[in-house]
Image (tube, rainbow, N blue to C red):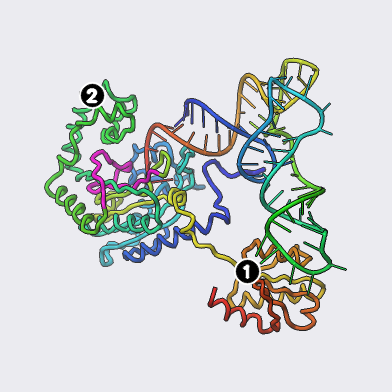
Amino acid sequence: MIKGIKGVKDILPEETPRWRFIEETARQWADRYGFHEIRIPIFEVTTLFARSIGATTDIVEKEMYTFPDRDGTSLTLRPEGTAGTVRAFIEHHRGADPLPQKYFYIGPMFRHERPQAGRLRQFHQFGVEYLGTQDPKADVDVIALLWRFLSDLRLPDLTLEINSLGTSTDRAAYLPVLVAFLQTRVGQLCENCRRRIDTNPLRVLDCKVPACRAATEDAPHLTSYLSPEAKDHFDQVLSTLSALGISFRLNPRLVRGLDYYCLTAFEITSSHLGAQNAVGAGGRYDGLVELLGGQPTPAVGFAAGLERIAMMLPSERVPTLRPSVYVASFGAEGSPAGVRLLDALRQVGLSALSDYRATTLKAHLRQADRAGCRFAVLLGDDEARAGSAVVRDMESKVQETIPLTDLPRYFVALSKNF
RNA sequence: GUGGGUGUAGCUCAGUUGGUUAGAGCGCCGGAUUGUGGAUCCGGAGGUCGCGGGUUCGAAACCCGUCAUCCACCCCA
């Protein structure tokens, strides 16, 4: 048997209503905030991701699906959506259009990781990118959109954590201080963190090892090294969030895994998720457009993991879609009449079905019941000859004989009530 | 990449110190009801016991290897 690839899952028909509901809700909230959908390619040239995400990040170093095109060009399956969106923004000269530009995307992303609860190799993200303003109200718009969306889905126990990463100059001033501090605590740090002092010192701060947390308890905070402008930006973000009644937790240890982030960084987590507890996360990336060759353009955005949302979405939030009419036709004359009836019902917009394996009325009704149909049309040879059929209400069991030609109109009239 | 758990019917799982023909529940199909669903009863279909070696008179069970899967580390949405 040929099996699917590790970490790549089928979403079967039982699950797709849940996915559709999440995606439709996401689109609805994006619309409300004025974000427009962009559909970017599944794969891009490798250098786009290497340059934007950061050559030394785990994603680029060991998680990308990279392969040569036939002419040798190195291509990569997108591991996230921001790089492609920004590339499209630059390539189509969107910066020349009235700013700001607000985009959202929904689709699959690919990272070669060991699968685990809430982590797959092909996974799906809903993300937004707000390009062209450095106003802190844009940061809040993005955070509020994510928060309102997740709250609307009634996901349990959500927490918004927020931090400021400062400007690149702020970080340049802070990093030597942090490194100096960490070096005084080297003995108390885990092996990983000792390595990170050189490679990515910020990451030491959000290490989960208790000893590391204790050792860095009184580490200098980046937030106390913020420039006046960065501090003002952060303060405005926080006060605006408060004005909207969105509560948050300041987390000075919060950093982002991708190099392009600056200033506002945030993450929404839930205790209902396993170890991979981030539902959505994002932040500001003012330097990225310029880094990729565009005009300097401030921007802020987020990405949310749809698998993680799907795991937490309460089942009662998922609307159930049921077919309305089951055609139980049988016999030499009833069967062909049933096929014509199905077609007629569908043409007037009704959801109508039948099980062609069923040869007895009993089997038909069992299928009608199982499919959850509200009505069954009983159509045997007797009815076919009479040019009518028996409509059975599956709940009340009330039956009524209706001329075949009237049935589409009859059900359309009824369908306004169910 | 590292660690741990689990692999038996479509699904969820039993399976005794190794012992004859591998079971249950749910689901599926049929019958009881020759044209009326859900409940009940009866019957039926459905299994290379993940795969490959080994130990043994005998392996679903024990050993080795391998693969898959889940969870965790790491990392991240």
Residue at 41%, 41% (x, y): give it: A276
- State the residue lying farthest toward the left: A228
Q: Can you give x and y, in whole percent of width and height, for residue A230 in the image? A: 16, 48
Determine crowd level at label 1: few under 14, some 14-19, many 20+ residues with C-alpha closer than 10 A. few
The residue carrying mark 1 is A395
How many numbered callouts?
Answer: 2
Image quarter where the N terminus of chain A lies is top right
> Which type of secondary structure does the marked residue at label 2 adopt?
loop
Residue A69 or residue A165, whichever sits in front: A165
Q: Which mark is residue A185?
A: 2
Q: Amino acid at mark 2?
A: Arg
Is residue A43 visible from the viewing direction of this image? no
Q: Can you give x and y, in whole percent of width and height, for residue A160 in the image? A: 30, 48
Specify whether residue A265 is painted magenta.
Answer: yes
Residue B14 or residue A127, whichever sits in front: B14
Residue at 78%, 83% (x, y): give it: A386
Cα–Cα gap, marks 2 and 1: 72 Å
Residue B26 or residue A326, whichever sits in front: B26
Residue at 23%, 24% (x, y): give it: A185
Q: Can you give x and y, in whole percent of width and height, for residue A252 in the image? A: 23, 40
Q: Which residues are magenta?
A: A247-271
- Disc 2 sits on a residue from what chain? A
> Which type of secondary structure does the marked residue at label 1 adopt?
loop
Specify whether residue A90 is painted magenta.
Answer: no
Give left or right: position of A132 versus A302.
left
Residue A404, placed above or below residue A295: below
Q: Which mark is first along the chain, 1 or 2?
A: 2
Q: Amino acid at mark 1?
A: Glu
- Disc 1 sits on a residue from what chain? A
Image quadrant where residue A151 sits: bottom left
